[in-house]
Image (cartoon, rainbow, N blue to C red):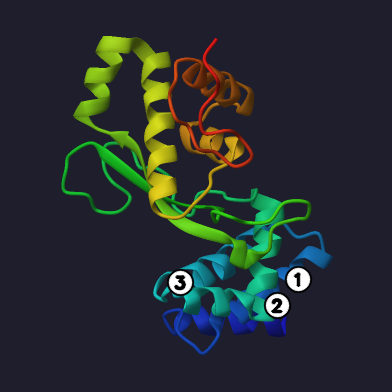
Amino acid sequence: ACSRRAVMLLVSNGGYCFRAQEVYWNHFQILQDRADLGAVKALDKAHRIVRKQAAQLGRRGRARFLAVRVNREIVDAWEKISGSGGALRRPEKGGSAHGDSQPGVTRVSVLIPIMGAPWGRPLRANEFIEVIWTVDAGKADQVLTQLKGEVGLRRARILRLCAEANVQGGDPREDDLARALGVSTRTIRSDIAYLRSQGCSVQTRGGPTLAPLQ
């Protein structure tokens, strides 16, 4: 009951208070213990606050901020529930999630492993990086669909997303690409194998940049 009142007070204050994420994090833990479906909603709000604040910092400042215990716990819990590297902002039909001036262009913020992140253990919160992906290039993608069909368009998007991620210091996984494009990981894996067989450079986490030509 005290936690619920704290959340209501936070909302009535326009969501502003020092370390607001802790209010929602505390509420999440209480609701989770009670098997309340509102737990995920509380966690999502805490996660959004953490990511919004982290996005306003430089790379080093963001790493230190995400290393703070409560922030790390929030991100780790969200990653386990929502899937590591999940989209921070989902694509919006007919527009851009980041206010792009080009009609029909859709960009989203996603969390993916940072380039050079270690293997052999679960990734920590500060080993992810936020990148901007163009999941729909508008008219350019429409032209690609007419020329190459849906499969050709998807493969072109895979190349684009990988290039955008690498430029921004990210190392995308097949799961990240599958979520962004709304297809299965198996489909992404098959598309990447095809692209590499054609000599295309596709840099993904754990995979070669270029497959040897037969």
- At 68% from the left and 56% from the top, the residue drawn is 118
Please tell me whether residue 97 is drawn above or below residue 31 in the rendered image: above
Tag nearer the camera, 2 or 3: 3
| Quadrant of the snapshot with the C terminus | top right
Tag nearer the camera, 3 or 1: 3
Residue at mark 2 to residue at mark 3: CA–CA distance:
27 Å
For residue 56, what is the image quadrant?
bottom left
Q: Position of residue 49 (x, y in %)?
A: 50, 72
Q: Helix, strand or loop at disc 1? A: helix
Q: Relative to residue 131, is residue 39 drawn left or right?
A: right
Residue at mark 3 to residue at mark 1: CA–CA distance:
29 Å
Front-lying residue, 190 or 150: 190
Front-lying residue, 61 or 35: 61
Residue 93 tag number:
none
- At 51% from the left and 66% from the top, the residue drawn is 48
Q: Position of residue 59 (x, y in %)?
A: 45, 71
